[in-house]
Image (tube, rainbow, N blue to C red):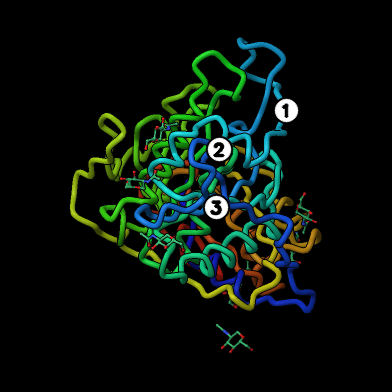
Amino acid sequence: MKYSTQLLGLFTSVALAAPIDLSRSDLHKLFIRQDVQSAVNASLPNVTIFATGGTIASQGTSNTQTTGYSVGLGVQQLVNAVPEILNISNIAGYQISNVDSGSINETISLKLAKMINEELAKSTVSGVVVTHGTDTLEETAFFLSSTITSSKPVILVGAMRPATALSADGPLNLFQAVTLAASPAAHNRGTMVVLNDRIGSAFYTTKNNANTLDTFFSTEAGQLGVFVNQVPFFFYAPAEPVGRVTFDVANVTDLAQVDILYSHQDMDPYLFNVSIAGGAKGIVFAGVGAGGMSRVASLNAERVFNATGVPIVASHRSSDGEDIVAVGAYGGVGE
Ligand SMILES: *[C@@H]1O[C@H](CO)[C@@H](O)[C@H](O)[C@H]1NC(C)=O
Ligand SMILES: *[C@@H]1O[C@H](CO)[C@@H](O)[C@H](O)[C@H]1NC(C)=O
Ligand SMILES: *[C@@H]1O[C@H](CO)[C@@H](O)[C@H](O)[C@H]1NC(C)=O
Ligand SMILES: *[C@@H]1O[C@H](CO)[C@@H](O)[C@H](O)[C@H]1NC(C)=O
Ligand SMILES: *[C@@H]1O[C@H](CO)[C@@H](O)[C@H](O)[C@H]1NC(C)=O
Ligand SMILES: *[C@@H]1O[C@H](CO)[C@@H](O)[C@H](O)[C@H]1NC(C)=O
Ligand SMILES: *[C@@H]1O[C@H](CO)[C@@H](O)[C@H](O)[C@H]1NC(C)=O
């Protein structure tokens, strides 16, 4: 299912009073190369890692355990596992959170967007890497793609196997992500996702398999590039995804609640009412086909829209394709 950019319009419209705590003196760390006892080599690019948790930061109880492990490794341990990255870039790290990606929320994603924009505004910073759980990595990737204004690279990276597993994929994924963030070839390509040797656009990439390593790709739009012997190879010259819209979240402190409803045969029309009762300020439905639902459900959706004015936006449960406005007077159209 694709996301709607109209949806993000809702996000910026709601700003509540309480500011997000951006104090970070305890979070920031510049990593020291042990062999030279120095953190900065002025000849190298500077990359900042924002660590949020996820499988890449997880440990199992045995080297064959690849489900049911727990998050716990900090950004220092992620870097310790790949000391080679300190030879290709000076690395600064921020521990933003340390949670599985199902627990990433608006506090964390807004904080990320604001801090990344500030970081990339520094002339010495070449690019940014975000380590993230894979389950909702595509959501943070799309959010950053819609809120980062810099032309410098922002690379989302994760792992499918915990750090303790045989053939753990995290360390090489992290090495490739830092390589890409430091690469001049990565400029003007939007936010990107790196896993399993592939470089994907954050705008299109989705997780397609719950378990396997070869899970992140975009079926219809394809990949942007691959790593060959750890060197990024792009298939095409830099290009922006058509239709990408960016929002300035510098002053946004709260995101509106938007629910996603999944359409199916005999869909319960009451779900729209439940969403409204739960405080939704917008509803996206993953429609059948190109954005449809049953006559009964669509009539109820229209009643809900007529009564509340809450936007109900069509998307589709099939992973690819364009939406149509299926039925009725919805507050927004799919794209
Ligand atoms: C600093 O980086 C440059 C460029 O990669 C390298 O040639 C040099 O050896 C590095 N200096 C140290 C002290 O590692
Ligand atoms: C990396 O940061 C150091 C210290 O701020 C700076 O001297 C150096 O020029 C930066 N490297 C690049 C490529 O901008
Ligand atoms: C980093 O580079 C230095 C030489 O500049 C080398 O001695 C050291 O082994 C390298 N470290 C890693 C982890 O590759
Ligand atoms: C988001 O998660 C973080 C970390 O668990 C937590 O500190 C914060 O309060 C959460 N924000 C909301 C709005 O629930
Ligand atoms: C954010 O707030 C600052 C300070 O009040 C203001 O100068 C700036 O224009 C605001 N930015 C946006 C996008 O509203
Ligand atoms: C919703 O409102 C429109 C415009 O007033 C009206 O044409 C339509 O019949 C209403 N839909 C339902 C299901 O009541
Ligand atoms: C949902 O809410 C609308 C608008 O208030 C109402 O007309 C409709 O009967 C409700 N639907 C159900 C199934 O309760």
Q: Which amino acid type is marked by label 1?
A: Ser
Q: Distance between the residues labelled 2 and 3?
A: 10 Å
In the rendered image, residue 27, in percent from the top left (x then y), is placed at 69, 55
Q: Which amino acid type is marked by label 3?
A: Ala
In the rendered image, residue 123, in percent from the top left (x then y), is placed at 41, 70
Please tell me in which quadrant of the rendered image residue 107 appears.
Answer: bottom right
Question: What residue would you read off at disc 2?
Answer: 79
204 or 152: nearer the eye? Answer: 152
Which badge, 2 or 1, is on the more N-terminal residue? 1
Question: What residue would you read off at disc 1?
Answer: 70
Which badge, 1 or 3, is on the more N-terminal residue? 1
Q: Is mark 3 on a helix, strand or loop?
A: strand
In the rendered image, residue 239, in percent from the top left (x then y), is placed at 25, 59
- Left or right: residue 197 versus residue 170 is left
255 or 20: nearer the eye? Answer: 20
Which dot, 2 or 1, sits closer to the camera?
Answer: 2
Question: What residue would you read off at disc 3?
Answer: 92
In the rendered image, residue 42, in percent from the top left (x then y), is placed at 39, 57
203 or 186: nearer the eye? Answer: 186
Which dot, 1 or 3, sits closer to the camera?
Answer: 3
131 or 94: nearer the eye? Answer: 94
Q: How packed is label 2: few (under 14 Cα within 10 Å), some, or many (20 or more)?
A: many
Q: Distance between the residues labelled 1 and 3?
A: 25 Å
Q: Are marks 2 and 3 in contact (CB under 8 Å)?
A: no
